[in-house]
Amino acid sequence: MHKTEAGEKAKVMRKEAGELARAAKAAMKAAKTLPDAGVKARELEGRADVLKAESEALKGAARLEDLHLWQMEKVKTTKRGSRTYHYWMANWRESGKVRNVHLGSCERMSQAEALQKAKRMKAEALGMADLCE
């Protein structure tokens, strides 16, 4: 998987959750001697669980962001001369293979619109349509 914004954010969250879980474990050991350490340990465990859940939710978003958008140029030659057409293409990995998808003309849609369309198509292909909305 390539580096994506959501993927990097999830990675930071997982690291922070691990640190909180270690701190909670240390607080539980200290709870045997200090009565208020148990409360602190449960609080740390709760925050660690929340961060783990959020990082799991970001995994799907990171997977949708991992696609490549590019412009294809096609030159058609006729009796009157040649004409160049530009259109948006996207590709991503699906089941171990690269899938190339035609998105539409560069004249009719902007790069942002093409990116949204590509994310929507990838979500449908991967069965994650609810994440792209």
Image (spheres, helix red, strand yellow):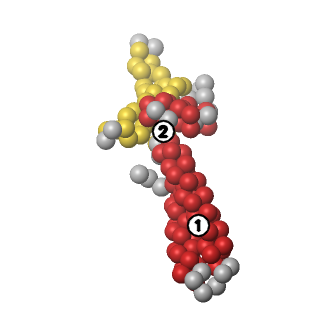
In-front residue for pair 16/67: 16
Location of residue 63 in the rendering, given as x and y in whole percent from the top left corner: 48, 45
Residue 89 seen in this snapshot:
no
Residue sitting farthest toward the left: 96
Q: Which residue is mark 2?
A: 70
Mark 1 lies on a secondary structure that is helix
Location of residue 62 in the rendering, given as x and y in whole percent from the top left corner: 51, 48
In-front residue for pair 2/78: 2
Residue sitting farthest toward the bottom: 33
Q: Amino acid at mark 2?
A: Trp
Answer few, some or many: residues within 10 Å of disc 1's Cα (few below 14, many 20 plus, some between 14 and 19): many
Q: Amino acid at mark 1?
A: Glu
Mark sitting on residue 125 = none
Q: Is residue 79 above or below residue 61?
A: above
Q: Which residue is mark 1?
A: 45
Q: Residue at x 54, y 81 (%)?
A: 29
Residue 56 seen in this snapshot:
yes
Mark whose residue sits in front, 1 or 2 = 1
Q: Is residue 23 above or below residue 64?
A: below
Q: Residue at x 57, y 60 (%)?
A: 49
Comes first in the chain, label 1 or label 2: 1
Residue sitting farthest toward the right: 36
**97 displayed left or right of 91:** left
Residue sitting farthest toward the top: 79
